[in-house]
Image (tube, rainbow, N blue to C red):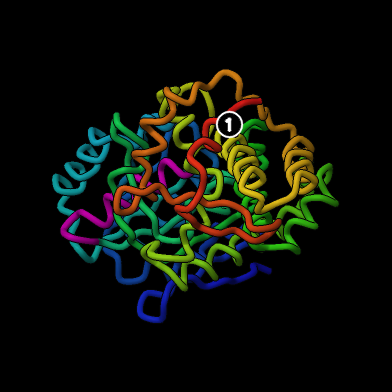
Amino acid sequence: MARELFAGRQENKYKILIGKKTISKKNLAPLLKNHAKALVISDDGIPSSITKNVYSICKNFTKISTLTLKQGEKTKSIQNFQKILNFLALNNFDRSDVIIAVGGGVIGDISGYVASSYLRGIQFIQIPTTLLAQVDSSVGGKTAINIPTGKNLVGAFYNPKGVIIDTEVLSTLPEREFKAGLAEVIKYGLIQNKYLLALLKNNAAEIQSKNGKILEEIIFESIKTKSKIVTKDEKENGVRAILNFGHTFGHAIEAEGKYKKILHGEAVAKGMLVASKISCLENLISPRDLIKIKSLLESYQFDLSLGQYKYMELKPFIFRDKKMKAGKLNLVLLDGISKGIVTDSFNAMHLKKALKN
């Protein structure tokens, strides 16, 4: 039996379904109602069994087109944004039609941004196939593409029509990508959800072996935390910013490596360690708390090395971050474990110090 959550305010609320075999006629039919055409966007790294299943279900309800992009962060480009827009226009898609994003965060982000832009907005459905997308990018309505000067600097807040999370598709996920997704789960535990943090501490082996029951529970708790936050603050004007814990430094590490050297979740794990070290330097958490956070990240086998990064090389990306306001950098820090805060009041020297091993 699928579990349900809702995100978004009353006027644009959408359902999130979580469970086994949720990619089904029963769940897709209501979302496809009244759509004459649908474009399924995926990438060449997604197992064909998943995309074929979506296609075979959807063709019973609407006329289906497909577009397959190359796998990887570089796919979130202006060139691919234009490519999808042109495809929609050439195939006479109108405002009554729908986009279905089948894939990880890259596919969900670019598909959502296209949906927000084409004809000033058409509907889209998220079917995330990676753990990272399931617990993070598919929920909350953030859509974006990258430009050479930074990650996710061009985009829009645009909610999906619905999100279908099938935990069974995670069995096809490469181990490295699965582990990278766990970084975002750990983030929710560290910024707010104490129950989730306890699950992560006490079930590391079961989670890493993809135990179905515990996996569904941590996904549910992650999304529950995110949906609660984004419903309060859809446009990131306040509390929603705490969801970026670890991301200011993680995005800088990704951008400095031109999105080739490290996966998003791997970079976020390093970023969370840096942000936790700053929190300790600012006397917001104790050295003992910092050791606990580092031990938790190490229990999930994240590479936490920082010595290869130079502050002056990361600095341009750090200070080009979307959390800059009125010329000041807002950092997400911890005012205690499971208590994320946003602040622009910190010692700038601590940024440089925290990047050292």
Instruction: Answer left or right for 13 relative to 332.
Output: left
Q: Is residue 184 left or right of residue 299?
A: left
Q: Which segment did they paint magenta?
A: 105-121
Q: Position of residue 122 (x, y in %)?
A: 25, 61
- Residue drawn at x 74%, y 32% as measured from the top left: 301
Is 70 or 311 nearer to us in this picture? 311
306 lies above or below 125: above
Closer to us: 205 or 1: 205
Q: Residue at x 55, y 49 (%)?
A: 245
Q: Percent from the top left, x then y, of residue 107?
A: 41, 43
Magenta-drawn stretch, dominant element (helix, strand or loop):
helix
Viewer can see residue 309:
yes
Residue 283 vertical placement versus 22 (above, below): above
| x, y percent for residue 292 | 79, 45
138 shown above or below 209: below
The N terminus - image quarter: bottom right
Q: Is residue 119 magenta?
A: yes
Where is the C terminus found, in terms of image quarters? top right
Residue placed at 80% from the left, 46% from the top?
A: 288
Alpha-carbon neighbours of circle 1 within 10 Å: few (<14), some, or many (≥20)?
some
Which residue type carries mark 1? Lys
Magenta segment: does it hold 129? Answer: no
Tell me the residue that label 1 is attached to.
353
Q: Residue 24: x, y in percent?
A: 54, 60
Q: Is residue 103 above or below residue 18?
A: above
For mark 1, give the secondary structure.
Answer: helix
In the displayed structure image, the side of residue 105 where residue 144 appears, left or right? left
